Structure formats: C-alpha cells, structure tokens
Amino acid sequence: MEWLDFNNDLPDEIDRFMEWAVAENKLEYDLILDMTDSSGGSNCVYPIRRFTDKSFKITKGNLRISDITKDFIALRSKIQIGKDRKYYAKKAEIDDGNALKQWLNGQVMDSCNSGAEYSNNLVFKKLYHTTNDSISPNDVHFKGRLVALFGPSSGSQIDQLSSILVDNKLAYCIGMSTGGFSNTWEWREEITNPNTGHVICNFMWTIGHTIRPNGEILEGNPPKVDDVIMPTKDNFLYYKNVLISKSMAYLKNHKN
C-alpha cells in the first residue's frame, strides 16, 4: 500500500479498503505499508486497528504550562462537535472527542493552578480513539505480517505511526528513522509591524510533547527501524524499489 497522507477522508477510505479485502478474501495476506512519500495529519490508529491482530499502546501527549495555556483551554473548549458528532464518533469508534474538553478543564487547569511545568500525559491530541492506554484490533482485521517502509521525508503523524509500530513490535520497519518532529498541540501567533499593525508572518509554536508508547519523548527521538537503508547518490533514483525488494526478501525468509 502506497500511503500519501492521513486526512479526514481516511476512515471512509479504510472502510472501503477493508470491504474489498473481505470480499476478495485477502485478510490472511501480508501487508507492506510504503510511507516514504506520505504527509502527516491524524487518525493513524484507525488503520492500525485493521492492519494487525495484536493489541497495542498508543502515543500520548501533554501540554507545557505557560502564559498561553488558559487561553488555549478557552479556545479549545469553544469547539463544538455538534453536527459532526457522527463523523467524530466514527473516527473515534470509542470516544467522540468530548474527553479532550474534560481533560483541559480538569487536569490541565489543575496543573496551571498548581504551578506545574507540564500537564499529565494523555492519549494523543484530539482523543479520537479512547482514554485507555491500550487499543484492541478491530473485529475485522488483517492476520498476516506487517512491513513498513520509511524514507527521508517522513515525520509528524508518520512519527506517531512508526512509534506505535516499532514500540509495540507490530511491524518490521525498513529504511530510515522518521524525522522526530511530531508534537501534540500548536499555538499560532501573529507577528505584526509595530508601525502599521500589518501582519508580517505567523509563527506556529509547539506547546507540548508527544510521548511514545515506550514512555520516551518522541521529538528528536524517533524509533529506530529494524533494517537501516540510507538513500545515497547511487540508489536515490530507485530508493523505493530497494526498500520494496528488501521487504519481499524479509517476508520470504521469515515465515510465520
């Protein structure tokens, strides 16, 4: 599977793919996930639940307590799920996203009032999946082996996916470690000209850490792949083919 991004259409696309896999009796097959050209986004837990037969821990996140934390809580608390409840619930499968507001107005606010440096760690970002630490496979899932390919441009949500795959030993990973620049939440700040008031640029600040399933901070610390293959001046034109060949050789030589 050649992956391109993790956007809001992902749950529906995955559902269609799984319907095809069931109709074509493909659930016993092995899967190779090619992440080398993928952008970021969210929702990576949604496909993982369908690509493995094992339970797994997921990434968590926290908030750094600063002078903008209470403003951030107020901003996030205004977001209404309302008309999108069915869509959010589908992405979540377990939680519709309201747990985020409860966390922000409860434990994070307590951290603000107590003078803590960081909030507690909680399941990543929008809490689309569950407030539990561990996720079970979907009722309909692939039962074969999983290989994942990562290249030099991988990061963000791909950081999170690789952390879940590597730290839980769900897949054999080939290529390069991801960029290690995934974060939890961001705060945007406009920089204006002091004389005219015109906006010069927008800064997006990282205001929290992503915590890998093994308990380590993800930023600057991406998980190591099982088989390191670096792009070079000799292989960069067909780097992806090299990774796919390595994947096929691994699957051939390592039977279940």
Image (tube, rainbow, N blue to C red):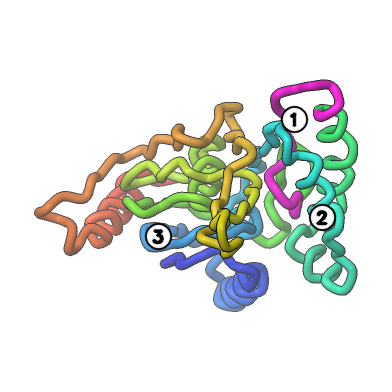
Position of 47 compared to 172: left or right? right
Residue beneath disc 3: 34
| Separation of marks 3 and 2 at Cα, in angstroms | 29 Å
Image mark for residue 30: none
Q: Residue at x 66, y 68 (%)?
A: 11
Occupied quadrant, residue 132: top right
Label 2 neighbourhood size at 10 Å, few (<14), some (14-19), many (20+)? Answer: many
Disc on the earlier residue, 3 or 2 = 3
Say which of 242 and 8 sits in front.
8
| Separation of marks 3 and 1 at Cα, in angstroms | 35 Å
Position of 176 compared to 137: left or right? left
Say which of 115 and 170 sits in front.
115
Image quadrant where one finds the C terminus: top left
Do the numbered discs 3 and 2 sit on residues whose CB atoms are within 8 Å?
no
Residue beneath disc 2: 97
Residue beneath disc 1: 119
Residue 72 vs 115, above or below: the answer is below
For label 1, the SS is loop
User: How many marks are shown on the rendered structure?
Assistant: 3
* Amino acid type for the residue under numbered disc 3: Asp
Identify the magenta region: 112-129
Which SS does the magenta portion mostly show?
A: loop
* Amino acid type for the residue under numbered disc 2: Gly
Asked if the stretch drawn in magenta spans residue 58, the answer is no
Disc on the earlier residue, 2 or 1 = 2
The x and y percentages for residue 122 are 74, 37
For label 3, the SS is strand
Do the numbered discs 3 and 1 sit on residues whose CB atoms are within 8 Å?
no
Is residue 143 among the parts visible in the rendering?
no
Label 1 neighbourhood size at 10 Å, few (<14), some (14-19), many (20+)? Answer: many
Say which of 185 and 255 sits in front.
185
Q: Nearer the viewer, mark 2 or mark 1?
A: 1
